[in-house]
Amino acid sequence: MRFRIRPVETTFYKLFSEAAEHLVHGSNLLALMLHTDADRKDIGDQMREAEHEADETTHKIVRRVNSTFITPFDREDIYRLAGSLDDVMDYMEEAVDLINLYGIGELPFELAAQVEVLQRATQLTADAMPGLRTMKNLEEYWIEINRLENQGDRIYRRILADLFSGNYKTIEVLKLKDVVVSLEHAIDSLESVANTVEQIAVKES
């Protein structure tokens, strides 16, 4: 029988929940970008601020790891989980920034489906983070995230097929493809978060 010394210190759990809540906020800002009457510059400013706040949470996690003798689970897993959470926000911020930098007008209808996947996956991730404390009842989370990632892949391929259908000018294809790829990377990073949670749960079981 294995015995584990579990530290009472709960800061890591709070910080991971905080990081995930940043992602929920970011995905909601992304959704606002799709509105025809959206103030995209203002949303871009809000997203940039949200990304800075997410970065600060990531830095807090790293500093905490470096100053804590006994961590709740392996240090490598903490770094990996924090990094994947941070990647999600970076890619979402990138998508918003590209829309503004490129001066993109109308966005493809299917882009809304990509953002909906992100909203659902970020909320599931935020709901799951408190479960790191006990490592219980997390299996449904990573299974659902995997399903959403597969759904995101299908949406991504449909958007690419539409972009290359001849209905768009070449320059529009290049601009929109960059945005769509950033959103796909954000969804992939959410799956990386779920995979890391699964690996941690297996180790701790």
Image (cartoon, rainbow, N blue to C red):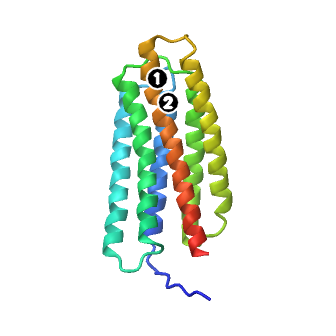
Residue 68: x and y, percent? 35, 76
Residue 38: x and y, percent? 45, 25
Amino acid type, label 2: Val
Residue 5: x and y, percent? 49, 85
Residue 156: x and y, percent? 57, 31
Say above or below: 82 vs 202.
Answer: above
Residue at the spot 51% in from the left edge and 26% down from the top edge: 34
Q: Is residue 101 left or right of residue 157?
A: left
- Location of the C terminus by quadrant is bottom right
On the image, numbered disc 1 is attached to which residue? 176
Question: Would you say the residues marked 2 and 1 are in contact, meaning their CB atoms lie under 8 Å apart?
Answer: yes
168 or 51, which is in the foreground?
A: 168
Residue at the spot 61% in from the left edge and 31% down from the top edge: 155
On the image, numbered disc 2 is attached to which residue? 180
Amino acid type, label 1: Leu
Is residue 11 at all visible to an observer of this figure? Answer: no
Q: Is residue 31 left or right of residue 137?
A: left
Using the numbered discs, state the Cα–Cα distance from disc 2 to disc 1 in whole angstroms.
Answer: 6 Å
- Location of the N terminus by quadrant is bottom right
